[in-house]
Image: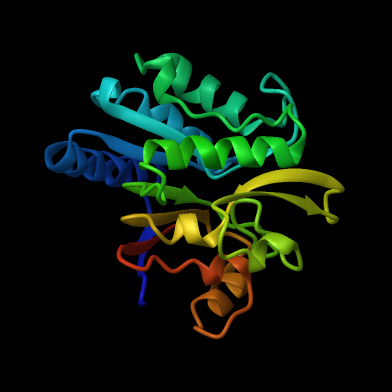
């Protein structure tokens, strides 16, 4: 599948516009909008701007593409970042925020999160309206790092994944879950990542981010300067 590649001069506003457009379409079509958030520094200003978007937050369901195995109030927690930038600023029901519980045993936390998602999907694969992802300098996305076991998972939707590079357990969505989304959008500040991006877009890359391929959905890369 050929992705749509957008080179943005107004990264935050363009990202928010894309998210709001997807939300409005999903709400009109299905009555809810399921959005998976990514961690890292790049999306934080996007989330802060989203808090001013006026979305109907009562009908938004939030998930997380990955999480560090730390408590939710830890400085490294993706959940904490999302709360500070967005979730604590908007009237979203607590039951609509599905948190990966990084403070639990990694295997237990992964099973619990998959169970929660499958429960909401009637036992099947949860289908997001929009999944936001980032990309690291090593081509990783979510917590799908090069050379780690999660890359080969084809049955489970969420797994625990030990990442030697950072000497830490992570929780991550797997390709089967990511690829079930109606739309996947990478938010990437391309400064310093041009070589990695060129390989990802070559069609022959082994970088984990290059392997995301929605089976019945769209793939977008929004690149900031």
Give the mark count.
0
What residue is shown at x 41% (from left), y 45% (from top)? 123
Q: Quadrant of residue 105?
A: top right
Task: Residue 146: tell me if it is visible.
Answer: yes
Front position in the image: 175 or 8? 175
Residue 102 in the image, given as x and y percentages of width and height: 70, 31
Quadrant position of residue 149: bottom right
Q: Is residue 225 something that shows in the picture? A: no
How was the colour assigned to the protein in this rendering? Answer: rainbow
Question: Horizontally, is 189 left or right of 160 in the view?
Answer: left
Q: Position of residue 186 (x, y in %)?
A: 46, 56
Quadrant (top left/top right/bottom left/bottom right) for the N terminus: bottom left
Q: Can you name the residue that lies furthest to the front here?
A: 123
> Could you tell me residue 171's position as x and y percent?
67, 44
* Quarter of image, res 151: bottom right
Task: Decide if residue 202 is on the left or right side of residue 54.
Answer: right
Foreground residue, 64 or 118?
118
Give above or below for 100 relative to 203: above
Q: Which residue corresponds to the image point at 79% horizontal and 51% vertical from the top-left?
A: 162
Instruction: Return the residue nearer the eye: 43 or 161.
Output: 161
Measuring from the top left, give residue 56's x and y in whole percent.
23, 24
* Residue at position x 56%, y 37% in the image: 113
* Figure check: 221 above or below 97: below
User: What residue is shown at x 21% (from left), y 42% (from top)?
Assistant: 26
């Amino acid at each position: 599948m050929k992705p749509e590649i957008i080179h943005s001069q107004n990264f935050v506003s363009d990202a928010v516009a894309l998210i709001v457009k997807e939300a409005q379409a999903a709400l009109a079509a299905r009555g809810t909008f399921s959005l998976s958030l990514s961690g890292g520094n790049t999306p934080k200003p996007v989330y802060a701007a989203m808090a001013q978007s006026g979305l109907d937050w009562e009908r938004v369901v939030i998930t997380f593409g990955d999480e560090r195995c730390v408590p939710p109030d830890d400085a490294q927690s993706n959940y904490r970042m999302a709360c500070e930038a967005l979730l604590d600023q908007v009237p979203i029901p607590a039951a609509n925020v599905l948190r990966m519980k990084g403070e639990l045993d990694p295997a237990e936390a992964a099973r619990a999160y998959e169970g929660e998602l499958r429960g909401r999907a009637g036992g099947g694969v949860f289908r997001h309206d929009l999944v936001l992802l980032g990309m690291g300098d090593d081509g990783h996305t979510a917590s799908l790092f090069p050379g780690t076991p999660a890359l080969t998972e084809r049955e489970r939707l969420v797994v625990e994944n030990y990442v030697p590079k950072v000497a830490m357990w992570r929780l991550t969505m797997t390709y089967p879950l990511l690829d079930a989304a109606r739309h996947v959008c990478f938010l990437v500040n391309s400064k310093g990542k041009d070589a990695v991006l060129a390989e990802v877009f070559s069609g022959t890359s082994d970088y984990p981010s290059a392997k995301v391929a929605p089976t019945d959905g769209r793939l977008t890369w929004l690149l900031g300067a």
